């Protein structure tokens, strides 16, 4: 039995792969989603003790972490769970960082806030997700900002809890560069912020749109993972690990 932390494109790939091999698995996400796989589905945040207890109770042999790159609490909770089984991180493909005067890679949101203040930007378009609303509160409480989030009640609840103005919420997924350009031209932000979310997060399209509209873009770097994880980037490698 394998425990898969998903909710991403990578998670779905892992689930389909396990089904092809007729391997039993449980698929878990923090919030409830529509799950169409053949495995057992559960949802809800899991602390290290929850993970350890679940693994022991259900005789889990491997943990595969295919969650979002920025799910830092989850990444740490899996590592600190007191369970002696392989902990595999299935990584998404990330883009090679580029050197461009409009593209700024920063390590933290604290650095981003300092950058925004230093350049006195007055209009921000955030493509960094609903969970970054609170992180950027010192900015949008004093300046104009729009956040693009998923069109679902859970996301709106996060925005409401932060007291973010609902009229400044935009809904939808990352788009092709041409659609992003239309969005940038419509709202005319002075700066854009996003995360180093890789190919599946359509980071390249965001960069292309930013440079095409001559808009500075801040990219928060992907967090560094613990060396305890066995980090892989292909289904082929995952197959080698599980079948040897």
Image: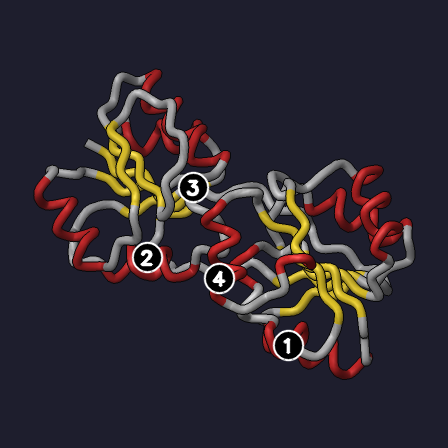
Within-10-Å neighbours for mark 4: few <14, some 14–19, many 20+: few
The residue nearer to you, when weighing 42 against 88, is: 42
- Label 3, secondary structure: give it: strand
State the separation of the CA atoms marked 1 and 2.
Answer: 27 Å
From the viewer's perspective, tell me whether residue 155 is left or right of residue 208. left
Q: Earlier in the sequence, mark 3 or mark 4?
A: 3
Q: Which residue is mark 1?
A: 111
Q: Which mark is residue 90?
A: 3
From the viewer's perspective, tell me whether residue 146 is left or right of residue 120. left
Q: Which residue is mark 4?
A: 224
- Label 4, secondary structure: give it: loop
The residue nearer to you, when weighing 88 against 46, is: 46
From the viewer's perspective, tell me whether residue 14 is left or right of residue 22. right
Image quadrant occupied by the C terminus: top left
Write the residue at 57% across / 43% down.
Answer: 151
State the separation of the CA atoms marked 2 and 4.
Answer: 12 Å
Asked if 176 appears above or below 153 in the picture, the reply is above
């Amino acid at each position: 039995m394998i425990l898969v932390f998903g909710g991403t494109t990578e998670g779905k790939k892992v689930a389909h792969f396990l089904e092809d091999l007729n391997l039993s698995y449980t698929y878990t996400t923090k919030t409830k989603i529509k799950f169409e796989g053949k495995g057992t589905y559960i949802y809800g945040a899991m602390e290290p003790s929850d993970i350890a207890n679940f693994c022991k109770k259900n005789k889990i042999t491997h943990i595969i972490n295919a969650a979002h790159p920025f799910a830092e609490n989850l990444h740490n909770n899996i590592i600190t769970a007191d369970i002696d089984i392989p902990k595999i991180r299935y990584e998404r493909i990330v883009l090679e960082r580029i050197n461009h005067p409009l593209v700024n890679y920063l390590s933290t949101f604290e650095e981003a806030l300092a950058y925004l203040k230093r350049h006195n930007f007055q209009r921000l378009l955030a493509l960094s997700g609903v969970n970054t609303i609170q992180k950027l509160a010192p900015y949008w409480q004093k300046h104009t900002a729009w956040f693009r989030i998923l069109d679902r009640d859970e996301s709106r609840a996060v925005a409401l809890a932060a007291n973010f103005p609902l009229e400044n919420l935009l809904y939808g997924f990352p788009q092709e560069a041409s659609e992003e350009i239309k969005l940038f031209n419509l709202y005319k932000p002075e700066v854009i912020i996003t995360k180093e979310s890789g190919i599946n997060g359509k980071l390249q399209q965001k960069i292309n749109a930013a440079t095409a509209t001559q808009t500075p873009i801040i990219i928060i770097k992907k967090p560094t993972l613990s060396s305890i994880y066995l980090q892989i980037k292909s289904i082929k490698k995952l197959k080698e690990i599980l079948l040897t």
